[in-house]
Each structure stands twice: as structure tokens, then as C-alpha cells.
Amino acid sequence: MLVLADMCDTFNYADDNTACCYDTSIQGVLKKLNKVVYKMLIWFSMFEMKVNNDKFQLIDTPGTERSLSVNVDEIIIQNQPVVKLLGLHVDSYLVLTLTWMKYAVRQEGN
């Protein structure tokens, strides 16, 4: 993908793209994240890729109760306690929960 290493780490799998930004302050993180999202949207547009705004998600570090948001193409994305990534649910403590395992356990408990 494009070079964003000076701002954050990016992870790509097929058509899923994840940006992981960090800084010494939350304002620094949000500034980097907004720049990264803007650059990613330009890159997608250059290669005629369609962005699904409904799939944009934001998660914060553990133990914080702050409300964060990022502007994505005129849509405000609020942080969530759990996000879904490649079929996994990831919480702010980076604990992964396999979606299919939750359903399998529920079925056994009937």
C-alpha cells in the first residue's frame, strides 16, 4: 500500500486495511489518524477502489473512558469498546474472540 510508516503501522489483508497509530498524547494519535485516513482515501480513489464507510471502526487503549472520533469522508467515526476485524472481535485490551466460537459455545449450552 502507500507509505505511512512515519505516522502509524498499517496492516493489509486482501481488501481489509487497518491503521494502528500511537503517540505520547491522544491529540497526537488523533492528528496522525486523521492524516492517515485522508491519505488512505486518496490512495483508494487513485486506484478506483470503493470505500465502505460502514466498516470503518475506531478503538482506544484499555482503561480509558474517553470519547474519541475521527472524520472519515464527512462521516464521524466514534470509538467502540469492541471492533470486528477479519471475523475476530477485538477489545481495547487486544483480547481476540473468534465469532464462530461464541456461537458454537452457545449451541452446546442449549
Image: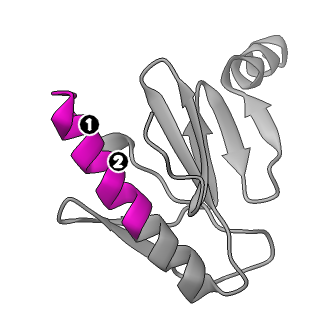
Rendering coords of residue 58 (x, y %)? 51, 59
Residue 17 locus on image (x, y percent): 48, 36
Q: Tell me where residue 13 sits by quadrant.
A: top right
3D distance between C-alphas at marks 1 and 2 = 6 Å
Considering the whole magenta stretch, tell me its main secondary structure: helix
| Residue under numbered circle 1 | 44
Residue type, label 1: Phe
Element type where label 1 sits in the image: helix
Circles 1, 2 touching at the beta carbon (< 8 Å): yes
Residue drawn where x is 73% and y is 68% of the image: 61
Q: How is the image coloured?
A: one colour
- Look at the image and give the residue range highlighted in magenta: 35-52
Residues 11 and 81: in front is 11
Q: Answer with left or right where residue 27 lies relative to residue 100.
A: left
What residue is disc 2 on?
40
Q: Is residue 46 above or below residue 95?
A: above
Q: Is residue 36 magenta?
A: yes
Res. 53 in view: no
Task: Identify which residue, 78 or 70, lies in the foreground.
Answer: 70
For the N terminus, the quadrant is: top left
Instruction: Indicate the position of residue 18 as horizontal and vertical percent values.
Output: 54, 42
Identify the secondary structure beneath mark 2: helix
Instruction: Categorize mark 2 by other alpha carbons within 10 Å: few (<14), some (14-19), many (20+).
Output: some
In the image, what residue occupies the spot 80% across and 76% down?
Answer: 63
Q: Is residue 26 left or right of residue 39?
A: right
Depicted 27 relative to depicted 60: above or below: below
State the residue in front, 86 or 80. 86
Query: At x 67% / y 25%, what residue is drawn?
Result: 99
